[in-house]
Amino acid sequence: MTLRLESMTVEQYLRYRRQAEASYARNIADSGAMPAPEAEAKAQEDYAKLLPDGLATPGHHFWTAYDGDDEVGMLWLHVEQKSDGPHAFGYDFEVRPDLRRRGYGRAMLQAVEQRCREWGVRSIGLSVFGFNLPARTLYEQMGFEATAIQMRKRL
């Protein structure tokens, strides 16, 4: 595998954005955090707030991951200056579904970690839905630690 990250094109971003809000809304609803209509509204509000200028929103980086000429996934990272230096937050990491469990997720995380080291980033945060055990396992294997845990009980 020869994985590389390239900045998303406008076309790739528009394709991503169309499916990302719907996917995020489904994940919110599937987690049980709120019913589907409220989850859809929350997804729209969150994306509008986070990305008021879309792909050109300052501090936000969107990459397409390639293995050779094949698109294998994408990453969305926000870097923000804080009092002790820059910190990053990964809003979305996704490997193409037909290529999962082949090491692409690990390689993508390693590539973004390297990029962050080059930028002097002090930490990378992320959120993962509790039901997404494969992603949680990968993140833990890559050294991510829980900083907060929300729990609920369905009645």
Image (cartoon, rainbow, N blue to C red):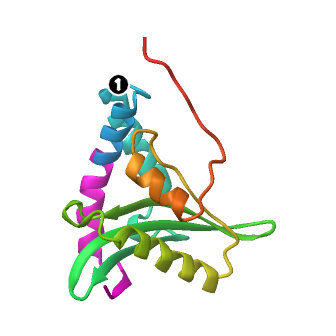
Q: Is residue 120 above or below residue 55?
A: below
Q: Magenta residues? A: 1-22
Q: Quadrant of residue 8?
A: bottom left
Q: Nearer the viewer, residue 25 or 130?
A: 130
Q: Circle 1: is it few (<14), some (14-19), or many (20+) Cα within 10 Å?
A: some
Residue at image x 29%, y 74%?
A: 10
**Amino acid on which disc 1 is placed:** Pro
Image location (x, y in percent) of residue 23: 29, 47
Q: Quadrant of residue 59?
A: bottom right
Asked if residue 11 is among those painted magenta in the image, a careful observer would answer yes
Residue at image x 29%, y 70%?
A: 102
Q: Is residue 51 above or below residue 28?
A: below
Image location (x, y in percent) of residue 140: 54, 57
The N terminus lies in quadrant: bottom left
Residue at image x 66%, y 47%?
A: 147
Image location (x, y in percent) of residue 155: 43, 11
The residue labelled by disc 1 is 35
Q: Is residue 6 above or below residue 141?
A: below
Indicate the secondary structure of the residue bearing disc 1.
Answer: loop
Q: Is residue 72 above or below residue 96?
A: below
Q: Quadrant of residue 82?
A: bottom right
Question: In the picture provided, is 63 more to the left or to the right than 86?
Answer: left
Q: Nearer the viewer, residue 60 or 29?
A: 29
Question: In the picture provided, is 33 more to the left or to the right than 89?
Answer: left
Asked if residue 100 is among those painted magenta in the image, a careful observer would answer no
Instruction: Tally the marks.
Output: 1
Whether residue 67 is visible to the viewer of this picture, yes or no, is: yes
Whether residue 8 is visible to the viewer of this picture, yes or no, is: no
Question: In the picture provided, is 37 more to the left or to the right than 114?
Answer: left
Residue at image x 42%, y 43%?
A: 45
Q: Residue furthest right?
A: 83
